[in-house]
Structure formats: structure tokens, C-alpha cells
Amino acid sequence: MERFYYIEVYKLFKRKDVFWSLLISVFLLLLFGLLAKTGSDILTIRGEKFSAIQYAIMMFGFLKTLFFFCFIFIIFTSSTFAGELEKGNLSLLLVRSENRVKIILSKVLALLTVLMVFIFFVIFSGIISYYIFLYNIKFATNEFLGKEYLRFLYMPLLSIFEIALLIMITMLLSLFFGVYKTNLLSIGLIILMKVLEKVDKIKVFIPTYLADINAWGNIYKTEHELLIKVMQNIGFLSIYIAIVLIVTLCYFSKMEIKN
């Protein structure tokens, strides 16, 4: 499976949409810093002082609020799987390996690798933006970590599991629909989950709510209580991921793939 994994990673990073999405996300973080430095009305910073890590993750959270990561990884996943099914490229992989589980897992791991790279570069560019533009402004503490930095680090950690689940769901939908329908259904599912977050009786089971530390993080006053809640939510998200992945593997193992 290692060989297929490296092939999938190479294919993803070779794609122009992956390259430009990564470049845009890094550029946006630098732009946010410049706008804050110049006092632009487009981006206004208020509230408590923040460290470099806190600022970077706040900007990461801002991109997440815009569904930036959700949208681009829906596109990456649907084109990686549904696109290859439509073009017949997936049948060529089956010629090289009859083990369909390896093919699915290699694609999943490749997409997760790209996700980790995106998160790393976004947070890293946020830190660079902080030290270039914001280091001595009144809202900056001029520290790297700052106080209660763990509460900030939980956001990208939870986001990894949330987007991983979205990747799994999009891949499952790709088995039944083409690229455009898969994209629309995945985006529609995100919107549905955001709507269901408003229903108190079921919101604790909704993945987007489980991953949104801003929605429930302030309830927990101690770091220990918050850590337990974060681990519980990661556990729930992991169960969802495992269920969708198992269903995908079972169906893909039996489906007929046309050349």
C-alpha cells in the first residue's frame, strides 16, 4: 500500500487546484496581518491580547468559519475519487492491485496528508504574519505561546477529525454520483448539519457542533474538564469516521467498476 500512497500524494500535490488553494490560504493569512497593521476597516481586531500561536489559530478559525477548508477538501476528494471513476483511471489502479481496500486507504491517507500540510502552512503563515506585521501593536503580547494556549490548539486538532469525516462522506458519495452531484450533496450536508446545530436535543450528536470548540468550550472552566470534553468529541468523530469508512470499503469492494 505504501507505493499507492506515494503515488496518490504525488498526484494531489501535482494538481493546480491543490497548489493554488494552498498558496491562497497562506497569502490570506499574510494579508490579514497587513490589514490589521494598517488599521483597515476590512479587518478589525478587538478583545484581549494574543500571542503568535493564538493569533495564527484565530485566523485559522476565521478561514474555517468561511468553510474554506470544507469546500476545498470536498473538491479535492470528489475529483480524486468520483473524477477518476468517471474517467476510468480507477480501473487502471485495479489492474496494478486487486486489493481495493489498499486503493481506498491510500487515497484517504493521501488526502489526510494534504490536510495536515494545509493546516501546518496556514498556522505557520499566521505566525510569520504576526511577527512581521503585529509584533508590537497594542493587541500583541509579543509571546509565542501565551496563556491558555492549549484552548487554542484544540481548534485545529478537532478540525482535523471534522474534515477527515467530511472526506470520508464525500468519498462515499463519490461511489454513487459524479463529481458535481457529489460536491453539491456534500456542501448541502454541511449546511444541514449547521442547521441541526440549532436543535438543542440533537446538536450534541452533530459532527460540526462536536468540532466547534467555540460553541461549547466556554462551559468548561478548568483545563482538565475541557481536555476530557475534547477527547470525548474526538472519540465521537472517530466513530463516525470509522463507520463511514467501513461502509465505503464494503460497498467499493463489491461494486462493478467500468473501464
Image: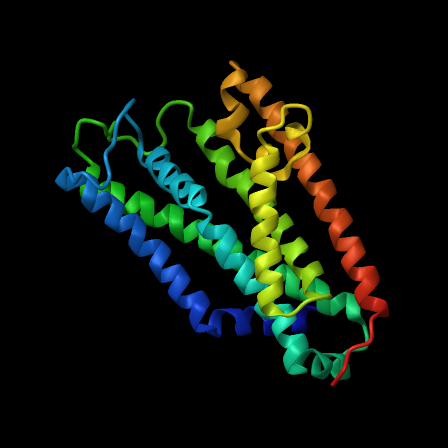
Q: Is residue 86 above or below residue 189?
A: below
Give left or right: position of 202 versus 34.
Answer: right
Residue 133 at x, y percent in the picture: 19, 42
Q: Quadrant of residue 22?
A: bottom left
Its colouring scheme is: rainbow
Residue 110 seen in the figure: no
Which residue appears at 78% of the width and 65% of the height? Answer: 101
Q: Residue furthest right?
A: 254
Instruction: Tell which of 93 and 200 is nearer to you.
Output: 200
Give left or right: position of 106 versus 155.
Answer: right
Residue 177 at x, y percent in the picture: 68, 67
Q: Is residue 197 above or below residue 4?
A: above
Q: Quadrant of the C terminus?
A: bottom right
Q: Quadrant of residue 102?
A: bottom right
Q: Quadrant of residue 43?
A: top left
Which residue appears at 23% of the width and 30% of the height? Answer: 140
Residue 84 at x, y percent in the picture: 64, 76
Residue 196 at x, y percent in the picture: 62, 35
Which residue appears at 15% of the width and 37% of the height? Answer: 39
Give left or right: position of 157 versus 232.
Answer: left
Give left or right: position of 3 versus 99.
Answer: left
Q: Residue furthest left?
A: 38
Residue 221 seen in the figure: yes
Which residue appears at 26% of the width and 45% of the height? Answer: 32
